[in-house]
Amino acid sequence: GAGVSQSPSNKVTEKGKDVELRCDPISGHTALYWYRQSLGQGLEFLIYFQGNSAPDKSGLPSDRFSAERTGGSVSTLTIQRTQQEDSAVYLCASSPQLGGNSPLHFGNGTRLTVT
Amino acid sequence: TQLLEQSPQFLSIQEGENLTVYCNSSSVFSSLQWYRQEPGEGPVLLVTVVTGGEVKKLKRLTFQFGDARKDSSLHITAAQPGDTGLYLCAGYLIQGAQKLVFGQGTRLTINP
């Protein structure tokens, strides 16, 4: 399939540990977004990439969160020293272009549980 | 403060009934999109509305964009159990139009 792929699909970690979440966007999509969804609620914007650049990091909840994108493709979201409030589903989406009313194509998310 | 307010947040109705979900804001959007999400999956785009006053139909679903481009509605006619899911509205702001902001969602349950 040529959709957005996220791994792992589920991650259980102990409080204080670091975790890394991976996103493989649709080939050729220049824009990539990360969102967080708690308990089947709406999506909280975290960060977006245009190519490898992240012009707006204002949505990251704290300095424990960081993200990078390499080769205009794969992106990783890293959470350091995880806390219980970090438990949520982390969704990645890609789009052919940034903004411009473009639709987002989502992966199935990584469900993170911090114990 | 939620930029896009959806109402109702939960709705449970019987098969065959009609329903409307609302998405409201005090901000102006260049476009609004509606997504549907099933458990364990990511949201999937249903429609994009771009022009103020625009109406789009997708089978039994009718989407409308407000004249002032601050609100939208989703109307479902003769709801079916297969319509069950989380419906999310999302929009690109006129200013800061690079990121798509989402409402909190409407969880719809259609009972047979």
Image (cartoon, rainbow, N blue to C red):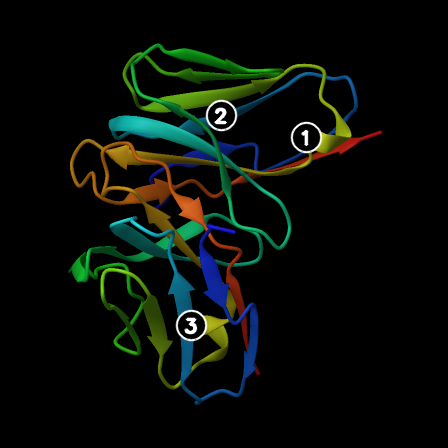
- Give x and y (percent) for residue B72: 41, 22
- Disc 3 from disc 2: Cα separation: 34 Å
Of A57 and A3, nearer the camera is A3
Question: Are labels 1 and 2 assigned to the same chain?
Answer: yes
Q: Is residue A90 visible?
A: no
Q: Earlier in the sequence, mark 1 or mark 2?
A: 2
Quadrant assignment, res B27: top left
Of labels 3 and 2, the one closer to you = 3
User: Could you say whether the residue bearing mark 2 is in a helix, strand or loop?
Assistant: strand
Residue shown at 23% from the left, 33% from the top: A100
Task: Assign a secondary structure to mark 1.
Answer: helix
Q: Which residue is mark 2?
A: B22
Query: Residue at horizontal 27%, vertical 16%?
Result: B68
Q: Residue at x 35, y 50 (%)?
A: A94
C-alpha distance separating marks 1 and 2: 16 Å
Identify the subunit bearing mark 2: B
- Give the amino acid type for the residue marked by disc 1 in the picture: Asp
State the mark number for residue A21.
Answer: 3
Asked if labels 1 and 3 share a chain, the reply is: no
Q: Nearer the viewer, residue B43 or A37?
A: B43
Residue density around tag 1, few if under 14, some if 14–19, many if 20 or more, within 10 Å = some
Residue A3 in percent (x, y) is at: 47, 50
Query: Marks 1 and 3, how far apart in space?
Result: 31 Å
- Residue marked by disc 1: B83
